[in-house]
Amino acid sequence: EAGVTQSPTHLIKTRGQQATLRCSPISGHTSVYWYQQALGLGLQFLLWYDEGEERNRGNFPPRFSGRQFPNYSSELNVNALELEDSALYLCASSNPTGLTGNTIYFGEGSWLTVV
Amino acid sequence: DQQVKQNSPSLSVQEGRISILNCDYTNSMFDYFLWYKKYPAEGPTFLISISSIKDKNEDGRFTVFLNKSAKHLSLHIVPSQPGDSAVYFCAASEYGNTGKLIFGQGTTLQVKP
């Protein structure tokens, strides 16, 4: 069974440009999450999509946005790129979420470098 | 405010011995805890989890212990193998907000042959 897949693996953008990262969840998973791991920092929660709706977002500015498509895949858009946006962006997925905990599986990540 | 803390940045153990990785948390609303293993430039790999209604969960060489009164959890790896060398993250989620994982800073485990 395929895991969470992300594309592109690496992306280099210029400051001020926009970046789009894509994610396909594990088959059967309807919830998709985005996390950021900047150099020297831990994993920070970015966004959570469930059945096409944004359920929660982390402490990131509005230029970080995304969406979830009817097939449950997702994309993350980062507008007006800044140098500090350079990071590993991780997508994750899980079975439909309830009130109690759920195992979340991560993809290999997309490296975004802003120059 | 660091809600999940892994106070040991690194740990070195001999192959075949036990590795114990620790994690403390401050948020009493956390009700689900997970451990992930991560190699450089790769995504985290899920290892084991535990619900707050349990105090122990075991899966092969990996056992997680939860002490709710102390707000402390630990991951035991027995026996440790060189392939276990990686960064280990503990993570937690709140009841009703299960998709938002709060991660610790990670502990780098080195298992020496």
Image: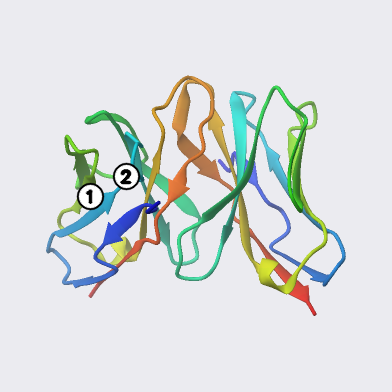
The quarter holding residue A61 reads: top left
**Up/down of B42 relative to B96, above or below:** below
Q: Do labels 2 and 1 share a chain?
A: yes
Counting from the top left corner in percent of width and height, residue B91 is at 58, 43
> Left or right: where does residue A80 sit relative to residue B45?
left
Q: Which mark is residue A76?
A: 1
Counting from the top left corner in percent of width and height, residue B63 is at 76, 45
Q: How far apart are marks 2 and 1 (CA)?
A: 13 Å
Nearest the eye: A35 or B5: A35
Looking at the rendered structure, the kind of residue marked 1 is: Leu
Local crowd at mark 1 within 10 Å, few (<14), some, or many (≥20)?
many
What residue does disc 2 label?
A60
The quarter holding residue B33 reads: top right
Give the number of the mark in front: 2 or 1: 1
Local crowd at mark 2 within 10 Å, few (<14), some, or many (≥20)?
few
Looking at the rendered structure, the kind of residue marked 2 is: Phe
**Up/down of B58 relative to A96, above or below:** below
